[in-house]
Amino acid sequence: MSENTLTSSAPSRLETPVNAPPPNNRRRQLALAVILACQLMVILDATVVTIALPGIQHALGFSSAGLSWVMNIYSLTFGGLLLLGGRAGDIFGRRRLLAWGIALFTLASLAGGLATNPTELLLARVAQGVGAAVAAPSTLALIVSTFRDPVERARAIGLFSAMSASGATVGLIVGGLLTSWLSWRWVMFINVPFGVLVTVLAPRVVEEPERRPGRLDLAGAATATGGMVSLVYGFIRAATIGWSDTPTLVCFAAAAVLLTVFVLVERRVAQPLLPLSLLTDKVRAGGYAAMALLAAAMFGMFFFVTQYLQTGLGMSPMKAGFGFLPLAVPIFAGARLAPRLVPKWGTRPFLLAAPVLLISGMALLTRVNAHTAYVSGVMPSLLLFGLGAGFTMVPLSLTILSTVRPEESGAASGTLQTMQQAGGSLGTAVGITAFTHATSHPSALPGAAGLHATLAHGVSLAMTCSLGLAAGAFLVLALFVRPPRPERSSARAQA
């Protein structure tokens, strides 16, 4: 049977042994709710502060340059430590790491909401990133170990992917509501009650999978963390200062060296931080690359559509947040429906057809101009993008994770989320570079009309870059991610 089989009549490597008692269904559903709440918290926090940034700047006295670090420092810490968090979960216990990570994340959120100056808020965001990196890799790993039946696991991963894909959009909506109704501090405080619930319930309803005794690969941890931090920081710096900036180039060079050393280290150690077998399979490696490119397109779109709705169309934070509902609803609906269809048709049809919808929505956004309205110009793009993303993310996650061995599930989950974080940083950096170049030549129109036309031209060029990233993801999916159809896999298993 092929290694990439998603459904088969033969027993899966992750299914419950014949003599094992079936887990309690109600407890499993409660466990899933806790895991999904954890994932929603860490994903939502990447964008929930976006709409609150003007209020944060006014209240705490951030400079314009320093304000970007309220978002960037979270992505930097989260993305840089994910692989280490995944391996630590395998060794020390995934349930334990999930609870510890969320506890730290919750305390940091409280501290951020109480911050009285920029330094306190940035330190709180660093602690949030550390907590998220500790907790997040355990989420998918716990789903894999909790739901051993392939159909149930597909549905659980579907819900997880829906939370991951729509969480960033929900963050924009929640951020708009909290900022408009209360204050910017509540984009931090909102995490506290949910974090307390997750921390208390996780040890009671989530089963602790079998641990994998061993030691942390310290050399691998140092090179992986250093490489990812350098890479993400390079993207962030490129977006704010420029791609030709010497420190930016040094960051990229350091990332290349450190990640190369990391691969060499992982080939030699007995218990690697990232088992390279996860990347030797062409389908899985292509899936990781496609996920990074899709995240790059998506986060770039989030950033610039938010700017256009508020600055170009003059929407309030609350209206701008609700403006993303046409994106969030189809993402969630597609992610809920896809797991029911994948067992019948396999993932291949979705990975070829759904990205076409996503690309079509992105192509419409490249046509933004000074006369583009929300209902006729932006909303149709968001609907198409949401449908495409909803029917792409779940099949892609299933393709990447369904054949991972239990002892590698933490590393596989950490790698998947690392690709999303690094991809998101890349997409934002590329888009900001294009936007800055386009807006350096102001429109000849006078007054507000000229400013609007300049903004629209910059957004259009940035969306063209995101369109290129989405098209790149489609090419990778078409050329490399070719899991067999379910019936073909079943026939091989019977033979």
Image (cartoon, rainbow, N blue to C red):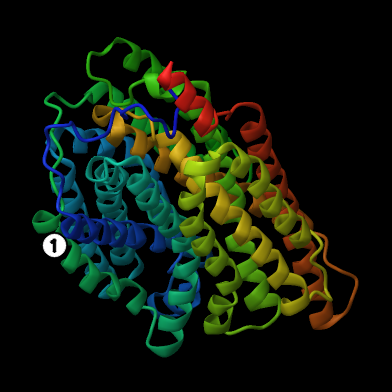
- Outermost residue toward the bottom? 181
> Residue 351's x, y, as percent?
60, 41
Q: Quadrant of the C terminus?
A: top left
Is residue 77 at least partly visible in the picture?
no
Q: How many marks?
A: 1
For the residue pair 105 and 358, the one nearer the viewer reads as: 358
Q: Quadrant of the N terminus?
A: top left
- Outermost residue toward the top? 268
Q: In the structure shown, which secondary structural element does the residue marked by tag 1 occupy?
A: helix
> Residue 145's x, y, as percent?
23, 40
Amino acid carrying label 1: it is Leu
> Residue 393's x, y, as percent?
51, 48
Q: Residue at x 87, y 80 (%)?
A: 446
For the residue pair 18 and 297, the one nearer the viewer reads as: 18
Q: Which residue position is annotated with label 1?
A: 201
Q: Residue at x 39, y 56 (%)?
A: 159
Position of 455 compared to 422: left or right? Answer: right
Q: Residue at x 15, y 57 (%)?
A: 202
166 relative to 415, above or below: below
For the residue pair 469 and 188, the one nearer the viewer reads as: 469
